[in-house]
Image (cartoon, grey):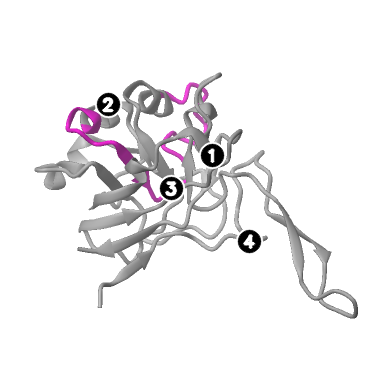
Amino acid sequence: MTKLYDISPPLGPDTPPFPGDQAYVQTWTATLGPGCPVNLSALTLSPHLGAHADAPLHYAAGAPAVGELALEPYLGPCRVVHAIGCGPLVRLEHLAHALPSLPPRVLVRTCRMAPTAWSDDFSAFAPETLDALAARGVRLVGIDSQSVDPADSKTLASHQRLLHHGLRVLENLVLDEVPEGDYELIALPLRLTHADASPVRAVLREL
């Protein structure tokens, strides 16, 4: 039987948001009982909670919302690369051992265990790393940290390189149990027509 890796963190009231983001809030608009045959809930949350796909609208005015994006980058051959202990920035030398014959999707594991609380001490992409990956035909990048840019960045240089190259991105992945190697990625965003991001249920399937 083909093995599946669920690389999405749990999403609920305990999910830590990026400072300033809307936390997960769930209320009940109906509950099972006499005269009511169903439970119905309402959710309020940032679309950047948990595993998610950023849209260009997140970092460029007038750019496409997540519901306008083609699905092809989020589905297909993918390589998981370990860069554990790389420090504040993932540089090309941290990925050098896995660069030959790259598939169009690259996910980078930077931490030994996915965080369960907010911390700004995480690894992000160096902008020139994204340039180099795009030059090699990569169409989507992913990372197991909260952002492709450092938490205190005001210029979002790596997000701007995503925009420049038309790269798609996944953030907040959980790659703790995933060995380096090639997989099939399945991580489709919702068709949210006005949103700057979308939660995804990201899965890797062994080839």
Residue 116 visible somewhere in the drawing = yes
Q: Earlier in the sequence, mark 3 or mark 2?
A: 2
Separation (CA) of disc 2 from disc 4: 35 Å
Q: Which mark is residue 115?
A: none
Write the start and end of the magenta stretch as one range: 133-157
Q: Amino acid at mark 3?
A: Ser
- Up-down: is 39 above or below 80? below
Q: Which mark is residue 197?
A: 1
Q: Earlier in the sequence, mark 1 or mark 2?
A: 2
Magenta segment, prevailing SS (helix, strand or loop) = loop
- Up-down: is 101 above or below 185? above
Query: 80 or 68, which lies in front?
Result: 68
Q: Earlier in the sequence, mark 2 or mark 4?
A: 4
Callout 1 secondary element: strand
Separation (CA) of disc 1 from disc 4: 17 Å
Query: In the rendered structure, does residue 167 fall within the stretch colored magenta?
Result: no
Closer mark to the observer between disc 3 and disc 4: 4
Q: Which mark is residue 128?
A: 2
Q: Amino acid at mark 4?
A: Gly
Query: 105 or 71, which lies in front?
Result: 71
Q: Which residue is mark 3?
A: 145
Q: Which residue is mark 4?
A: 12
Estimate the x, y position of residue 141 in percent, counting from the top left. 33, 41
Query: 144 or 139, which lies in front?
Result: 139
